[in-house]
Image (cartoon, rainbow, N blue to C red):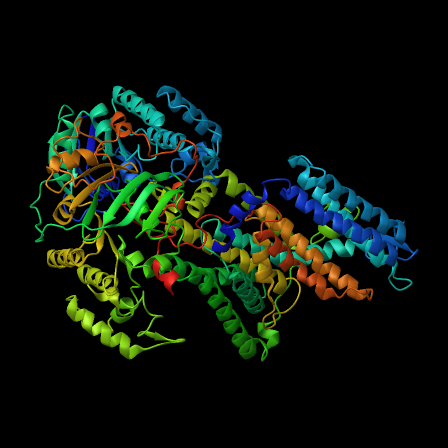
Amino acid sequence: MSTTAVPDVAVASVNEGFWTRTRKVGLVLVALGLLATVLFGALATGEQARFTLSEDAAGAALEINGTVGAIVFGLIALAAGGSMLAGLPKRWFVPVLAVGLVAFVLSFLCWQVSAAPTGQNFMPLVNIVRGTFLLALPLIFGSLAGVLCERSGVVNVAIEGQLLMGAFSGALFGSISGSVWVGLVAAAIGGSLISLLLAVFSIRYLVDQVVMGIVLNLLALGITGFLYERLMQTDAARYNSAPRFSNWEIPLLSDIPLLGPALFRGNIFLYLALLLVLVIHIALFRTRWGLRTRSVGEHPTAADTLGVRVLGLRYRNVIMAGAVAGIGGASYTLALFSFTKNMIGGKGFIALAALIFGRWSPTGALLAALFFGFADQLATYLGAINSVIPGQFLAMLPYLATILAVAGLVGRVRAPAADGKPYIKG
Amino acid sequence: MEPGEIHALLGENGAGKSTLMNVLYGLYQPDEGEILVDGKPLRLRGPSDAIAAGIGMVHQHFMLVPVFTVTENIMLGAEQVRGGIAGFLDRRRARREVAEVSERYNLRVDPDAVIEDLPVGIQQRVEIVKALTRDVDLLILDEPTAVLTPQETEELLTVMRSLKAAGKSIVFITHKLGEVKAIADRITVIRRGKTVGTASPEASRDELAALMVGRTVRLTVDKAPATPGEPVLELSGLVVDDDRQVRAVDGVDLTVRAGEVLGVAGVQGNGQTELIEAIMGLRPVLAGTITLNGQRIDGWSTKKVLRAGVGYVPEDRSVDGLVKEFTVAENLVLDMYDRPPFGRGLSLRPDEINRSARERIEQFDVRTSSADAPVGTLSGGNQQKVIVARELSRPLKLFIAAQPTRGVDVGSIEFIHSRVVHERDAGTAVLVVSSELDEVIGLADRIAVMYRGRIIGVVGPDTPREEIGLLMAGITPDATGGSPQDGSAPTATTDPDVVATTDADVVSDAGTPATTDRDVPATTDGVVSAEGPGSEDEKDR
């Protein structure tokens, strides 16, 4: 995306003088720490805040007095910010920042949990972790689709449409055939059809890639919406009752406390997402395909002079991206719900944000997706305990975080140099 | 080409050297003709065919991925892989190969350095290593010294000699005579896409310069002797950088008087573009002053400079001179659209605009179907006439024309030249910049030759072309005698500083590392500035 090329320069100038990036971030963290210590500490009640390692109030739990917890974690955040202000060595920046932010969140949770109505002063961590991953799933698939596409130089705004088409084809063909596997393959094909259109129009006909992406999102919405009303609503039993993947328990791993029940009793999509992150990460940075993909996304002319087939590689990557996103869409219809109109509901755009926030890397995208998923899950939890904080505030977090990331505050965010630029030979 | 030979391809910018070599490297397809390697015709469908045929090329704008390491750049396209279909990169082997080649040819590079952190000279070395790891027999170097410091140039020449000793053939593209004489075994001179001669390195600089500049039929321009008046434009100690923050104009003093045409000659890329953009307020002045009729105008906005009575024909008409999608009539009022009679308050007055457009189309002989035709549909010559018509339609003190007849048919050339002379006779000071020596000689009353950001000499139009050609190549005559001079020229004919240095000196600033090529628009003649497109028009809008 062309707009993100600019922060490069901005960051360079920020680094000059006393107010380095570390110090600026430190200042923000100090402010957050103060807020946590004073405000959260004052608002927290003397009730115990219980974080249970199960799905309900029962079982082993981590407990702390609400007020004490809010203040202690607030002070930790404050200290982390302070050390940054004092001039922290660069290699410590990321770990200290992580500690500070986690402490801030914990302080916030101590307040919230302790202030919850009597009898609800607990947070079931298994639910939270599982929900985080569940909500992050389409984002992981979506942002991986973005990585595949944009690393080769084609902007993928059509993630939303690819997810939606995948969800739809998965539901339709899964229902007709009665097989989850047929549904899964159909979902991949559905997603790649959308991205094939993106590829043809942006690579062959040089249509603006962002505009094309938006058009494809609307197209996918229109087609699936129409067929949903005509087919699925009239005969749901036949066309919209796809079989679902059951949960697979992984032996041994599923017995780990907290992580076991949350992560290793999931469905195929959860495992597939984590596997894909790993595979794409290794492929991108360790294989010939990855080297060529990145070269085509950065400097296609150079790649061309070395005999790399620029356009062919772009076609291949864009279509693969569609397949990945299509499977992501099926993680709804072949595991959780039956298809409904516009069921992706903007997750594709949050995936795009996760891609940018994760700096166009598969692991970064995973972390960003999990962060967004956590914010989403937390919003649900706060609603359940009647928190004074409206859930909508937390729903804003993905967008806020992306704006900060693009503005260069979280580090150097640099899109592939040729991202969004069609390659014209000669 | 023979094995173990360094063959220099000499010619001015835009002469077709790079195009020829891109064909040889398979990047462009030839329209006609064929390429013979070892006597066999070769069809190149792409660079990989060229590489397979043992042809390697170091491009003028480096073909390196800035965020990749040296090894990654070198292995790209010819990766060593393990693990069958997965194709895992064998980095260790690639690194070893890089180390080996750089050892063998004494081209030291750090295989793990990231390209964007490396100085330009080292990046070029990486390019050469990249070609060598592909076992090329023929290496094409496209203007390799253009971006190098004198020290780096020396090193490159040493490298070229050792490559030659190793039996590699080299095509060395340049317009620098000194380097050619220092290294080439054979020289081919190209001009306007044609081979105009072959020479041995023993040929004198004069001969080479003459071949390069050419001896075409002189275009004559009818004009009376000039009657110069008061100085209108005075430049003093002007210093300007180009887009890459490399010094482009390095202390220029120049005076243009009312009623005379001062022609600036020089091989393109010696600072002419930046000089004019600085006068027009399109480029910041780093030092020195620009005065117009005694008033300082440096630091003024372009709009203010134009309104002060300066007319400007930019060198790239399609990028800087016209809005192609706009009609002829609209383009004719780009400078005056907000002034009466064309504009009133917030609105334009189409009737006035069209009436005046029809008048000027008539007056300047613009061949167009109508005043409402988009200007992009006109031929190059007629587009240029639209610009000239626009710029000459307001009272001027100074008229600046850069490459006024580039890519223009002969008829339009004559017409534009006569308008320029007409403007001079009306008492306007005229500054013409052209890389066509014929044009400068035909139009100018005095000729200033620009070389490496300086005015290397100011001579009269009757000076022999060979002498001007030498000046353009940076060679000043030992004696100042013989060149008829106007007397009013503020610059000395010879600049001892420049005489001493015939090799690379001012061009590249050693203190500016890692300006990667992707920042610079890759136009063949390298004249379009990044901030350039449409800037004049935009500021006016």
Residue B527 in percent (x, y) is at 30, 47
Picture quarter containing residue A43? bottom right
> In this image, A33 relative to A292: left or right?
right
Picture quarter containing residue B517? top left
The relative height of residue A174 versus residue B281 in the rendered view (above or below) is below
**Residue at screen point 36% across, 57% down:** B302
Picture quarter containing residue A203? bottom left
**Residue at screen point 11% across, 32% down:** B482
Residue A220 in percent (x, y) is at 50, 69
The relative height of residue A316 versus residue B268 in the rendered view (above or below) is below
> In this image, B197 relative to A235: left or right?
left
Residue A154 in percent (x, y) is at 45, 54
As rendered, which of B216 and B477 lies closer to the eye?
B477
The reply to whether residue B172 is in sight is: yes
**Residue at screen point 22% across, 40% down:** B489
As rendered, which of A196 and A51 lies closer to the eye?
A51
Q: Could you tell me how many numbered marks the image carries?
A: 0
Residue A94 in percent (x, y) is at 67, 41
Question: Which quarter of the image is occupied by the C terminus of chain B?
Answer: bottom left
> In this image, B536 relative to B361: left or right?
right
Question: Which quarter of the image is occupied by the N terminus of chain B?
Answer: top left
As rendered, which of A57 and B388 lies closer to the eye?
B388
The relative height of residue A225 versus residue B411 in the rendered view (above or below) is below
